[in-house]
Amino acid sequence: RDDPHVLFSLSKSFASTGIGLAIAEGRVSLDDTVLSFFPEEAPAEPSENLKGMRVRDLLAMSTGHHADAIEPFPYMDPSVSPVRAFLALPVAHKPGTHFVYNTPASFMLSAIVQKVSGTPLVDYLRPRLFEPLGIRNPQWDATPNGVSSSTLYAGVRKRWSGRGTKNAVRGTLKSEPFCSSSVKTQLVSCSIERGRNRSDIGWSLVRSDATPGRARTGRLRLRIGGPLRLG
């Protein structure tokens, strides 16, 4: 059926897919600093760690925050800019060195896509991903100022199960620019060491032989409801 289903944290995979598409279109680079997109929202005296935070750190959830600094987060408070609130958080660690599960970081990916494209993430993905995959009428929670926030609602039809889903998605995502080799190489190169494991939790594209919490060398897959090998 096409009734919307709440996708919870699977929404993060769609947010990072939006960044991958924006990279393919030349709108964003993994090494762009977060502050470069929102100079008007920056603190008066940003810390060195905040200055060094890049798009790749948002994707890898290695922004340098502590867990208690990002919860709760004012997504829906009309009196607060969520982007300004994120940039005001203390960044205790050098970005790229410390992992914490970070939903606000995924929100910032959405805000960046909207900043560079002029359209909310849900609308940016509609012709590039949702429509080719047959996902009808996707909806996304939005902040009071219209930024797609934490939760995506999407209709998943009965045919989106088993091998039919994998074949449909594989055929769609092999097309350019989504799977250009340069973008795949960039996306798969970023993860953060966590002891013996590596964190790719913010990325939609990970290595094809990865398991939760661990990524090894291999081909790429898109993690939307399960591993899909691309090429």
Image (cartoon, rainbow, N blue to C red):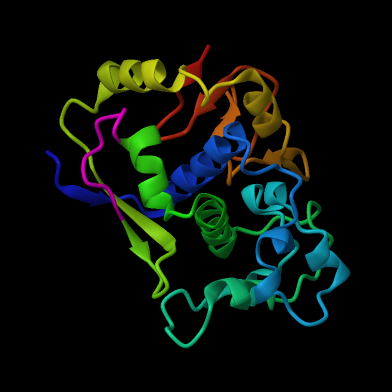
Q: Is residue 46 left or right of residue 74?
A: right
Q: Is residue 80 magenta?
A: no
**Residue at (78%, 45%) from the top-left corner?**
195
Residue range in magenta is 131-139
Report the front residue among 157 and 76. Answer: 76
Residue depicted at 84% across the width and 60% down the height: 94
Where 214 sits versus 83, above or below?
Answer: above
Q: Is residue 30 above or below residue 79?
A: above
Image spot of residue 167 (x, y percent): 33, 15
Going by the picture, which residue comes out furthest to the left?
1
Residue 68 appears in the rendering: no
**Residue at the spot 76% in from the left edge and 58% down from the top edge:** 53
Q: Position of residue 18 (x, y in %)?
A: 50, 43
Which x, y percent locates residue 224?
A: 41, 35
Extreme residue toward the right, this view: 48
Q: Is residue 151 visible?
A: yes
Question: Would you identify the image quadrant in which residue 91 lies?
Answer: bottom right
